[in-house]
Image (cartoon, rainbow, N blue to C red):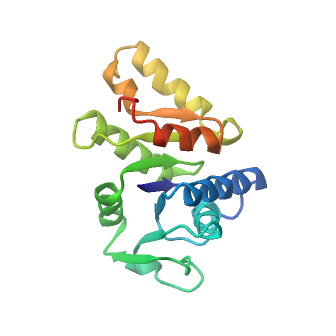
Amino acid sequence: MKVCVFGASSDDIRDVYVRETEHLGELMGQNDMDLVFGGGQHGLMGAAARGVRRSNGRVISISPFIFNEDDILFHDFSELYLTRDLIERKQLMLEISDSFVAVPGGIGTIDELFEVYAQSHLGYYRKPLILFNINGYFDMLWQFVCESHEEGFISDDGMLHCRMADSAEEVIRLLKDKNLTW
């Protein structure tokens, strides 16, 4: 299974996010889940990649050509795809991944997770999307989604396309659960 992880590229974040994301990466590697990610060595992108490699998992890096620099890219990858821009990167991630996990991040992470959510809701993809709610990071975002549902802006079916998990173990369990409807 190819699991795309979206997350922060900044190193200027609290250690709890790095630790938990590395742990998720380790569990992914131990469960034969390949990491698909944006290619960065910093922030939570780098943390996920380090965790996967620590457990001898495969790392598939997809990065815009302009980021192909020693101080930006994670170098211990199994496969590298260089794209023209962020739009092409996101499209390739959507195409080759079987499922998606968002860990805490900024504008780019939010853009990526809502792109997956919208495409799934519209029926283009039926692939799991899980918010890894480290330290309650996604609480307010999930509240927004739930309020949107209550107000009729997101259908009952739309609520099935995204799940939230509070631990790395729960993320793995959800990814492996064949009985869930996405």
In the rendered image, the residue lying farthest to the bottom is: 70
Question: Residue at the spot x=57%, y=48% of the render?
Answer: 103
The percent position of residue 123, horizontal first and vertical second, equals 22, 37
Res 52 seen here: yes
Q: Is residue 111 visible?
A: no
Q: The C terminus appears in which quarter of the rendering?
A: top left
Where is residue 13 drawn, in percent x and y? 72, 56
Which of these two is toward me, 124 or 104?
124
Which of 143/61 is in front? 61
* Residue at horizontal 48 percent and vertical 46 percent from the top: 110
Q: Is residue 12 left or right of residue 76?
A: right
Q: Nearer the viewer, residue 98 or 122?
A: 98
* Quadrant (top left/top right/bottom left/bottom right) for the N terminus: bottom left
Q: Residue furthest right?
A: 15
Looking at the image, residue 142 lies above or below residue 86: above
146 left or right of 84?
Answer: right
At horizontal 54% and vertical 39% (from top left) the residue drawn is 173
**Residue 79 place in picture, x, y as percent:** 42, 76
In this view, 57 is above or below 166: below
